Image: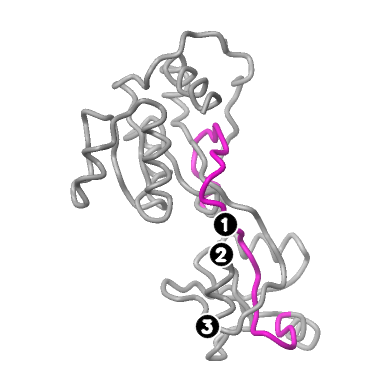
Amino acid sequence: MAERPGAGFRSLHASRRRLAPELRIAVPRGALFAGTLDLLDRLGIDTAEVRANDRRLLFEEAGIVTMRPSDVPTYVEAGAADLGITGKDVLLEQSDRMVHELRDLGYGRCVMVLATRAGEDRVADALRHLGVVRIATKYPRVAAAHFEATSRQAEIVEVKGSVELAPLTGLVEGIVDLTATGTTLRENDLVIREEIAVCTARLIANPVADKLKAAQIDRLLEQLDGV
């Protein structure tokens, strides 16, 4: 994933306008959905139809297409959407996607953590006695990169469901997961051992659209700076 080249050198004095209809934005359903629609409303984009329809996915009049957060970088990279909003956790896991990260939008804050069962640190114990630790996660790339960066050997077990179950059943010694309040971890007798990354909603752009539609995107960024 590339940082946006030359963004700071574009004109910041264009007149304030609403998001042009020729820009299509990928909006994540799920935890970031309500906050994203609120933000778009403040930018002058009418989201009433999106809010009123749980099943429809494409809203041409508003320039909005809705999808799972993990699909947003795919659509933006391919040019099916000019812009997209998704969590930093998704971008970290899909770091090979060719998209430009334009803004940290600040909402939807969560923390990527390493957690184990309360009491003895089973991750540290496994590393000390075996030289390798088993880690369950929905974010295998993030987990592998974290352990590699800290020179520790980890066997990564990818799971799709409730990752908190894995250490309780003895499948693994620890988990790497995203948490907002820590409540689910505490309810399952898990404690945070390490914080890996703070994750918030991010605005991303298709690299070609970022060049060809620079004027429209710059106007949007000015509006974002104003709200």
Q: Amino acid at mark 1?
A: Cys
Query: Which of these two is toward me, 226 or 81?
Result: 226
Question: Which residue was labeled with disc 1?
Answer: 110
Q: Picture coordinates of residue 54 (x, y %)?
A: 22, 51
Please report contact status of discs 2 and 3: CB closer than 8 Å, yes or no. Answer: no
In the orientation shown, which residue stands out farthest toward the bottom? 169
Please report contact status of discs 1 and 2: CB closer than 8 Å, yes or no. Answer: yes
Q: Above or below — where is 170 with respect to 87?
A: below
Q: Above or below — where is 24 with respect to 93?
A: above
Magenta part of the chain: 94-123
* Residue at 50 percent of width and 52 percent of height: 90
Query: Which of these two is toward me, 48 or 165?
Result: 48
Question: Which residue was labeled with disc 3?
Answer: 166
Q: Amino acid at mark 2?
A: Thr
Question: Which residue was labeled with disc 2?
Answer: 179
Q: Distance between the Cα atoms at labels 2 and 3?
A: 16 Å
Q: Earlier in the sequence, mark 1 or mark 2?
A: 1
Q: Picture coordinates of residue 201 (x, y %)?
A: 51, 45
Neighbourhood count class around disc 2 (C-alpha, 10 Å): few under 14, some 14–19, many 20 upward: some
